[in-house]
Amino acid sequence: MKSILALALLMFMHQSPIQAQTYSSKYEKPLSTVMNGLEKRFKVKFKYNVDTTGLKLTYADFRVRAYSLEESLRNILAQFDFNYWKQSDNIYKIKPYEYPRRHVQEGELMLKYLSGLYSNKQQFEMRRDSVRREVRKLLEIDKYKDSLVHHKAILGKIIKNDGYTVQNICIETLPGEHLFGSIYSPATKGKHPLIICPDGHFNGGRYRKDEQQRLGTLARMGAICVDFDLYGWGESEKEYGKDSHQTDRAHVIQALNAEVLLDYMWNNRKDVDKKRIGVNGGSGGGTHTILLTVLDNRITAAAPTVNLASHFDGGCPCESGKPIQLAGGGTCNPELISFFAPHPLLIVSDGGDWTSSVPQLEFPFLKRIYGFYGAEDKLTNVHLPNERHDFGINKRQANYDFFIKVFNLDRTKLDESKVKVLEPSALQSHIK
């Protein structure tokens, strides 16, 4: 009996700090130990984009909730500025905290909060006007617009194609800085709608095949389309450098470039129908589609594609580098695009990216706002549940259908095979 007691005493004296955790040791455990325990307890697997070596968690076991893995993860990971993202039923990725990215449940709560701020058109418009002013201020776009040099645009030669033309454009915006873009125009005479097309982060930038197909097809059907390089991409990279894109300056410059192009086309092209001004972009271009509707009341139709979410502001600083989401005490892209009511609006979403929540979450929010104006028929969601994040043919078709309807384009000219895909060099200005 004495030998058993002695052995028990010896084991107690040699207990590890983990086993003997107490209030005086702040119930501390290595983070890796805690996470391994969660894996076993909840039968899941963690993948890491962070280094947990040497990290210690105080009050460790008290942060675990037996009824919820995700609440446990929130309690634990917030201490290190980490976050979790569910990859499948039993796999979670552990990543650094990202300011523009939230969980779907947080987006749901945000939209519920915003919906409680207005119950009628009058209340909504008071909120709209206030937030719009604050977005401009936070973006600082007016400071940049005051510095524009207003030099004459440099236009390239007109490239004639089947039913449309392409002409490159370069405008010096700020002293020594330029925007580089291309104008796709119908071959037919008369007044045409104008569509400004901010680009996203798809490989190849604005020179890629599907971008040329979309703009060329819209031009063949009767719309003038203008796209331009992202800040620090394409020809812009030669001017600013490759690393310039991942900056908050990219956010305001890309918005500025869209405004400069709209101003140029508005003031200098007699074939532009000023009553039909659209904006259309995918992914990050969708973010700037939304932003342009907030900044410019000349827009009459908009189609942000594979972009809209209440829980994601855009993962690149060119989309979220300026703190516009803090306007009005906190806002999000669905509220920003709701300010566009009652104008025609298309939201294209899919099941393979952050827009998968649109039919159940963001679209009902927008439908309520459009209901204030009796304009639910002006709002459309094309959801592609089996598709992923791209600007594929079904997304392009949704955009074609939308602009055919709202701008009375010629559907008989809808034929992507008639669009000639040009080499990137043919769409560049090549200024020195």
Image: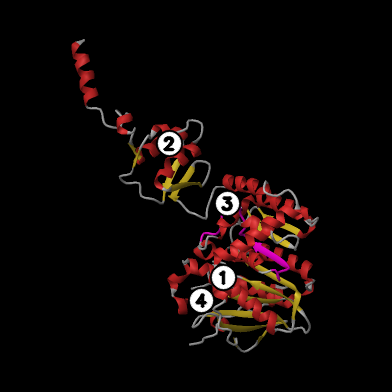
Please state which amino acid type lies under the numbered disc 2.
Leu
| Mark 1 to mark 2 CA distance (whole Å) | 47 Å
Residue 328 is situated, as x and y percent measured from the top left of the image, at: 60, 55
Q: Which residue is mark 1?
A: 141
| Mark 2 to mark 3 CA distance (whole Å) | 26 Å
Of 369 and 408, nearer the camera is 369
Which dot, 2 or 3, sits closer to the camera? 3
Please state which amino acid type lies under the numbered disc 1.
Ile
Query: Is residue 61 positioned above or below 295 on the image?
Result: above
In magenta segment, residue 308: yes
Query: Is residue 312 positioned above or below 392 on the image?
Result: above
At 44% from the left and 41% from the top, the residue drawn is 45
Residue 296 is situated, as x and y percent measured from the top left of the image, at: 66, 69
Quadrant assignment, res 185: bottom right
Q: Is residue 176 left or right of residue 255?
A: left
Q: Main secondary structure of the magenta part?
A: loop
Please state which amino acid type lies under the numbered disc 3.
His
Which label's residue is closer to the chain start, 2 or 3? 2
10 Å crowding of disc 2: few (<14), some (14-19), many (20+): some
Q: Which residue is mark 4?
A: 234
